[in-house]
Amino acid sequence: MTEVFGKITVNAPYSVAMDAIVRRLRTSKNTLALVVPFRKLGIGTNLGVERDVMVAFVPMRGAKGAQQLHDEVEFTWEPTGGGPFPTFCGTLRMHPEGSRTELVLSGEYQPPGGKLGDAFDAVIGKRVAEATAQTLLERLKDDLESDFAAIKATIEETQHTE
């Protein structure tokens, strides 16, 4: 098994980030098209690796008190269309950091293809997986910060009309 880890800080309070993540995870299908630029792999070009992945989320755990807040979500992602690509199983955790939220992704996958797959993974596969995880975190960050900006604008607009 190959382990993957990534983290990112979101400019949105924990409660807003949590609500936005929970809303997104309740949709019946979570398909994301993730593009991993080669430059993230240390190859100096703007070309990229693109593969649609089906992200399936497992019921949340980590309930806290009467508010039923959940700070951990288990998920898998699996490339659509078959091919020699691994399925990733992981966890997304959220931690409050003052007025911001840290998202931490961790998990693992088994490279397909036996010894040949292990060799590919050692040379570039793990870097592709780590870049894909970071791309997913960046996408979540953009979405959560956009949600927070919209909430903030609504609150400010409401305060100006009162």
Image (tube, rainbow, N blue to C red):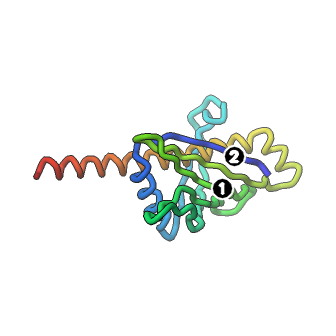
From the top left corner, tell me how far across and down residue 153 is, in percent: 25, 47
Badge 2 vs badge 1, beta-carbon distance below 8 Å: yes
- Amino acid type, residue under disc 1 in the picture: Gly
Residue 13 appears in the picture as rendered: yes
Which is more N-terminal, label 1 or label 2? Answer: 2
Residue 121's quadrant in the figure?
top right
The structure residue drawn at horizontal position 68% and vertical position 52%, both measured from the top left corner, is 107
Q: Nearer the viewer, residue 59 or 137?
A: 59
Residue drawn 86% across the image and 49% down it: 116
- Is there any visible trace of residue 143 in the rendered image? no
Q: How many marks?
A: 2
Packing grade of label 2 (10 A; few <14, some 14-19, many >=20) is many
Q: Quickly name the residue at label 1.
A: 90
Residue 43 lies left or right of residue 69; in this view the side is right
**Residue 108 locus on image (x, y percent):** 72, 52
Identify the amino acid type marked 2. Answer: Val
